Every structure is written in C-alpha cells, then in structure tokens.
Image (cartoon, coloured by chain):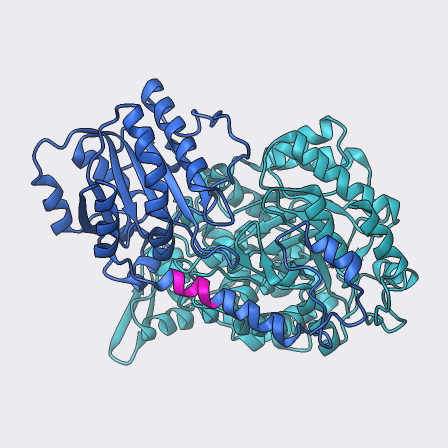
Amino acid sequence: MKRVVYRHVIGAKSYVFEDLRDLMAKATPLRSGDQLAGLAASSAEEAVAARMALAELPLKTFLSEALIPYEADEVTRLIIDTHDGHAFAAVASLTVGGFRDWLLSDEATGETLAKLAPGITPEMAAAVSKIMRLQDLIAVARKCRAVTRFRNTIGLPGTMAVRLQPNHPTDDPRGIAASIIDGLSYGCGDAVIGINPVSDNLGVLGDLLKLIDEVIQRYAIPTQGCVLTHVTSSIELIARGAPVDLVFQSVAGTEAANRSFGIDLAVLREGYAAGLSLKRGTLGQNLMYFETGQGSALSAEAHHGVDQQTLEARAYAVCRAFDPLLVNTVVGFIGPEYLYDGKQITRAGLEDHFCGKLMGLPLGCDVCYTNHAEADQDDMDGLLTLLAAAGVTYIMGVPGADDVMLNYQSTSFHDQLYIRDLLGLKRAPEFERWLQEQGLTGADGRLLPQVGAPRLIASLAELVA
Amino acid sequence: MSAPGRPLDPWQRLAALTPARIGLGRAGSGLGTGETLRFALAHAQARDAVHAALDEAALASELKKLGLDSITLASRAAGRASYLLRPDLGRALDAASRAALEARADTSCDIALVVADGLSASAIAAQTAPFLASFLPLAQHHHWSLSPAVIVSQGRVAIGDEIGALLGARLSLLLIGERPGLSSPDSLGLYITYAPRPGRRDGERNCVSNIHGAGLSSTEAAARAAWLIDAALARGLSGVALKDESASATSPRLATDNP
C-alpha cells in the first residue's frame, strides 16, 4: 500500500500524520470508540490541524490511496471497482475543503447531487463530513433525494416514513399483533412493519412472516413486512415458501467485520436474488433492508486502524450495491464505549445520514440510546428534530419508545406525530391515502379524534381476540 | 389522563397481551403527563441501577448466611466512568486482586463462583442470594466443590476467565448484573465457562439470562445452570456446542447484551 505522511504546521508546532488513515482518524470530531481504539487526536489542536490538512487534500487522493488495502478487503475492491469516474468528473479537481464549499453552494442541487452520487466513495463522504458542522450536514443532506419503491413510494420530498417496530420479549404473535394495531392507529408503518425476533428458529420466523403478511393482505395495506433475521435464514425461509417481502441484514464496512456477522458480498447477492425471485413488490423491486452503526467493526476487532465513522460510510458502499429499499444507522444502540453521550450520538447520527444520502441511499435513522449511555429523551428529541430537518428518509416507531425486547429506547409512535406536526411531513403517498380511506386520518394527514375505535382497529383487534 | 376518545375495550384487552407500552393515549401529538413521568421514572431507575455501587460487605454477609465465604476483589477499571469507557479494564483484575488470588494455596475446585456487578449492582443485590439459595443444594447434590464466592467490583464477563484460571477451577460460574432495560432494571445473568482462562471467546460460554422478578425465576435459573454445568463437566466443553436441552417450561432469552 502506498504510504504518504501528512503534515500541518500551526505556529511553532508541526503535526505529523503517518498516513491517510491516521489523518482521517485524527480529523474526526471526538468520540469514545476512536479513543478506545487508540486512534483519536491527542489534543484539541491536533484534531483541528488534521482537519486543516484534510481540507487541503485533493478528493481524488482517495482513488489512489486505499485506507484498507485492495488486496486484503472485498469492500475496498467493491468501492474501487464500481466507482463511476464519469460522475466524479464534476468534482474531480476539488480538494476536500473545496468540495465542502461546493456542496453548500447553490450549484449543488438535488439533481446534480443525484448524478454525482455514484462518483462519491465512502471515504470522500466521510472526509468532507469531518470538516462540516451540524448545520452543514443538515443543509446538504436535505438537498439529496433517494426514492425507493416496493409497495409504496419512500423518500419523496416533504415526506418521512416510519418503521413500525412491534417487538415482543418472547415473540408472542398476539403480543406482536397488539403492538402492530397500536402503531397503525397512530399512522405508522409505511417504511415497513419490521420485527426483531428473539428466536432464530425457522418455524417461529415463518409464523411471524405469515402474521405480518396476513395483516397486510387482509387490509390491503400499501406497505411491506420484514422479520429482521440473518440473511441466510431469509434465504432458507424463501426456499420453504415463506412470504418474505424484504431481506434484512446488518452490515459493516470491512470484509472481516462482515465475516464476524457471518456474511460476505456473495451471500448478500444470494439473498437479494432470492428476494427478487418472489416478485412480491407491486410498485418496485427495492427489497433489501440494511442496518449499520458506528463501532461495529472495532467491536469485531476488524477495524484495520480506521476510525469508526469512515468505516460506517464504507458500510454504505456495501448497501449501495444492492439497491436497498431502506438503510438505517442504529446510532445509539452500541453503547457508551463507542458513542459516549447525547452529543456524540447526535453528531454521529447526522454524519451517518449525510454520508448515506450523499452516496445516494434512502437513509433512515434509529434515533436511540441505551441506559448506560449519558443520554436521555431530551437528546433524542434534539436528534429527531435535526434529522427530520435534514430530510431523514424514515425513523422507527416503537410503542412508548421502550423496546421491551432489545432493552433500549428509540422513537415512539408519538414522536413521529410530533415531528409531522412540527414540520408538515407526510407519509408515503399510497399509505397516506390508505389511512384516509380507513378513517384514521383526515385530508390533512392528521389523526382524526377516535370516537369509538374505527372499523379497522375494531376489526384488527378481532384478530387477536 | 384518560385516552382521549378511546374506549377501554379493545385497548385494555390488547394491552394485556404485551409488556410493550401500547394504548397510551395522547395529549395533542405527545404523551400525556402521567405517561411522560412514568417513563422518566423508569429511565431514572435504570440509570440509578447502572451507577449504583456494589455493597460488597452486605453481599458477603448475605452469602455467609448461606454458608459461603467470600473474597472481595476489583477489576482494573478505577470507577464507573472508566468501566463504561474501557471494556478491556473491566475484564482484568487489578494488581492487588491478582496477587491476593495468587497467594492462596490449594484452591483447586470444580466451580469458581464469581459475582460481578456488571451493569447493574442492584441486580446483584436483589438476585444473588435467592439464586444461590436455589443453586447450592443442587451443587451439593452433584458433589461439586465450590470456590469461595469471589465478589468483583467493576467487573465484566471475561474477568471470570482470569479468576477461574488462578483458582485452578474446572469451570467458572459468573453471576453478573445485566444491562438494565426500562422495564427490567435489576436483571441478573449467569455465564458458564468450561476450563476458564484469559482469551476465551463469548461463543465458548453458556448464558442464562433475564433472571428477575418479572423474568426467569431463581429456581428455574438454578435448575438450568445446574443442568448446563453437569453437561459441560461431562462433555468437557461449554458454549455454542452445548445446547440447552434442560426440560424447562420456557426457553431462555438470548443473551445479546454481554455486560
């Protein structure tokens, strides 16, 4: 691997960064995971020196200097082999700092950014994000558009979707159905009705898929279902004839981290092909659902000395190869040794959203925290509001924000109502129409006062009687 | 507040089907005051559980009543902040603790019994004695020799490997406070590791999780632990190769939150 030493002088002090990985890591705004890995800048001044050096770096450097060697990592090979030089030409002469200025300018419209996306590598996205403030991350992400379709249309301007997350500590179908009914009554579920199962038993998983499918089919709900299990289980379930809409997998930004998840690009291709073979989408065939999160590679001891935010952006390169319907960072789930407090979680959530959107992905966010992190509902309210302003594609809807299976707090059915009211955000149009037809919402998309359970809810409740 | 416009049925019926917070009603788009404060209380209790210090003396005196001697040790994590930020420090004994164990003569035993605070000292305070009260008769029945209870503050799961190795135990049984959920701030987890030594991976352990008032009972957890220990000692291994086939009414939750 080509190694270049980078330097930046501030006053009498010369800061030396031993290679591009080191420069990227030290330029990263402070977070506990990079400190744990021993990669963080050792002083506040060193971090800014690194950002100044990074700002002067030509963007095209990332095409010749791989942070993780091409020979050693299939994610690097994917990034380099699928890079679109023609799309990149628009910004090929810029430095990282010049790229930031261009992104903020009126020249960078939604249309030009969409054309540029295949020319942006994850390392370029990560680099520019490191020298951006929160308002930059929000302003640029808001201009990006990524529209995807399966049974509805996700990502249109002025909309935000919600995953209905009806988890139960023992996968009890009636308990899960109860949470689905509650979520639908709040107008949630246009992104997906998606269950995190406790079990990895194929019989149990198949029953959960049938449960979601029955609800969607019986009430002709324009949405899709998913049981968030390992891709190899989904492949097996498809072979057994189970009604799989979306194929889920957690992914990371290095080959070694993906192997620790029990996957590689080949098995993802197999899962994608299996999903496509069912032809269950009515409006489109975006059917992969990916989750990611900063820190996963370090946690698997597979980070190659690269900072966690850059590796997170590399995970989006994996996602991008499979035209996904949904991608979300589970930003605060991993714990305080990677993202210590509300400030670090907030910054990471906005970085992840920006990088994913710049790379052309339908990026959502699980705005969340665990009880051992220095965070609370106020931090989540802040991040939710900032992400919605940035045009986040979707968020989670968890009953009362308390996931009783995964033991963490996410956004609630109420939280999505708050942000819709605040910013006037609509649901996926097909789902919005369906809610109106069911008498759950009015013409303005707001929930109607429910005097007596509307027909739909009463009928759904009969399912679990 | 009452759920505006929502009749009690079917929501009451639905709410009985899940511990999830459903049928909450709303105030405008938000939660009503009562639910907002109930949530804040649950979070406060979970936070307090994370930051509570382990009262080692009280625990040792409870264990004494069960006929168990104790040794009190500490990990290399100097305090809660260090514990949360540096998982590596919580997995290793500090120098004094290591020396104290090394100085003990003839410690060989079947089971190294380790009690670590993990992410919830309140889980240890609440669940340790009831669990051991159920477990000790089973251990006696199997004629297993036990080490004194090794109480470790700021400990993570893997610290049981070092302790088990220093004691020359055939197997370690580690009790640890689990990551507190909003609805379960004092949940205990058990980790069973055959031939403990530093460097063991998580896939080489068996876990019994979710032991608390509303979860798995002490009696059932003890039965399951005894079954796993018996099987591990007989087969000379623990972990993914050893599936829990104990005749138990409910299946355990997967241990996804390794403190």
Q: Residue at x 38, y 69 (%)?
A: A50
Q: Is residue A251 left or right of residue A238?
A: left
**Extreme-top residue of the structure:** B234
Q: Main secondary structure of the magenta part?
A: helix
Which of these two is toward me, B205 or A83?
B205
Among the 4 quarters of the image, the one containing residue A172: top right
**Extreme-front residue of the structure:** B65
How far across and down, in percent of the image, does residue A444 sit?
Answer: 86, 74
Q: How many marks?
A: 0
Q: Residue at x 60, y 33 (%)?
A: A266
Q: Residue at x 22, y 54 (%)?
A: B76
Q: Please say whether residue B45 is one of the residues in the magenta stretch.
A: yes
What color does chain B have in the rendering? blue
How far across and down, in percent of the image, does residue A240 sit?
Answer: 73, 26
Measured along the vertical axis of the image, is residue B64 above or below residue A307?
above
What color does chain A have in the rendering? cyan
Residue B59 shows in this picture = yes
Measured along the vertical axis of the image, is residue A333 above or below residue B103?
below
**Extreme-right residue of the structure:** A437
Q: Is residue A465 left or right of residue A10?
A: right
How far across and down, in percent of the image, does residue A364 sit?
Answer: 65, 59
How far across and down, in percent of the image, does residue A293 sit?
Answer: 52, 54
Which of these two is toward me, A313 or A453?
A453
Range of magenta residues: B44-49
Q: Please say whether residue A211 is one of the residues in the magenta stretch.
A: no
